[in-house]
Amino acid sequence: MMHHPSATRLKVAAIALFCAGGGLSASAQDASPWNGEVHAEARLIAGGAVKTAGTEWKRAGIEIRLDPGWKTYWRYPGDSGVPPTLDFAGSENVESVTALWPAPERFDDGAGGHSIGYHGDVVLPLRITANDASKPTLLHVTMGYAACSNICVPVQAQLDLTLSGKASTEEPALVAAEARVPRRVTLGANRDFGIASVHRETDGAHERVVVDVAAPDGAPLDLFVEGPTPEWALPLPEPVVGQSGAGKRQFAFDLDGLPQGAQTQGAMLTFTLVSPADAIEVKARLD
C-alpha cells in the first residue's frame, strides 16, 4: 500500500473544436470516452443546468469504474492510500468548479489498518459555474487516483467534455450521486441522526476524542474524521463498546497523526456520519 498524502494515455474527446478566434464551437455530448488503465477507468458525464436562489450552475460528474475487488479512495484515504487529485486548468468558460464527495465506506487495508473509499462504480458530482451561462462550457480535468486490490496502481486520466447545460441521459446517475453526498448540518442539530457532542478526554500524556452520536438502534453506522488541514492524519474513529442503545452511540479515536507543532485546542475537525439511508457532515471545534 502507498502511504497517503496524495504511461498516461491522452484521449481527446471529439466534443469540442476551438476556432481560430479562441471561442468554443462544439456539439455537446452526454459523456466523454473512458480513459484509464486495465483495472480502473474514468470519464466525464454531463447533466443539465440548475438554478437555485439566483445562482445558476451546470451539473456534471466524474465517473470511475473499477474491476471487481478493486477500490479507490475518498478525499481523506484513512490509514493508507492516496486521495484523488483534480486539476481543472485548461477549461473554457469556467468561473469555478466544486467537487462533491458521496459518502464513502471503510475497507480493511490488509496491513492491520483501514482505508476509506469506494468500490465498483462511483460518480463524483461536479458543480460548474460558467463565466457566461448562455454559452457552452468546455470542462478539462486532469485526474490522478489510485486503484487498489492486493497491489495499488497509480492512474492518471485526461478528460474533456463540452457542457451545453441541457438535460442528458446521465442526469439520473448524477442526481443519485448527489443524493449520497453528506448533508452539512450543525453539531447537535438532529436528535434522530446526528452528532450530539465532541469532547476530549485526557489520561496523563494520552489524549483521545469522544464523539456522541444519535442514530436508530441497530442501524449500520460509520464515522470518519478529518483535521483542519490535509497534513492531519487522524485515526479512524472506532465504536466504544457498551456505549450504545436508546438511539445513542459513541465513537472514540486517539489524537495521533498530527503535524509537528499542531495545536489541538480549538482545532476545527470535520466529521462524516454514514448509514445506508443517510449521511451528514458536521464541523466541530475541539474544546
Image: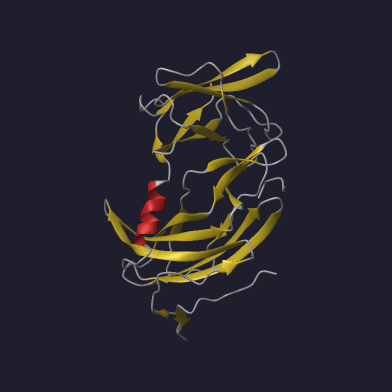
From the viewer's perspective, tell me whether residue 220 is left or right of residue 150. Answer: left
Q: Is residue 46 above or below residue 74?
A: below
Q: Is residue 103 above or below residue 91?
A: above
- Which of 89 and 74 lies nearest the eye of the viewer? 74
Residue located 45% across and 78% down the image? 16
- Which of 219 and 134 lies nearest the eye of the viewer? 219
Residue occupying the far front of the picture: 68
- Which of 280 and 201 lies nearest the eye of the viewer? 280
Residue located 64% across and 61% down the image? 155
Q: Position of residue 14 (x, y in %)?
A: 48, 79
Residue occupying the far top of the picture: 204
Q: Is residue 16 above or below residue 218?
A: below
Viewer can see residue 193: yes
- Which of 265 and 169 lies nearest the eye of the viewer? 169
Residue located 47% across and 43% down the image? 103
Q: How is the image coloured?
A: secondary structure
Report which quarter residue 142 is drawn in.
bottom right
Viewer can see residue 22: no
Q: Position of residue 179 (x, y in %)?
A: 38, 47
Q: Position of residue 118 (x, y in %)?
A: 54, 49
Report which quarter residue 173 is drawn in.
bottom left
From the viewer's perspective, tell me whether residue 116 is left or right of residue 256. Answer: left
Q: Is residue 57 above or below residue 247?
A: below
From the viewer's perspective, tell me whether residue 268 is left or right of residue 145. Answer: left
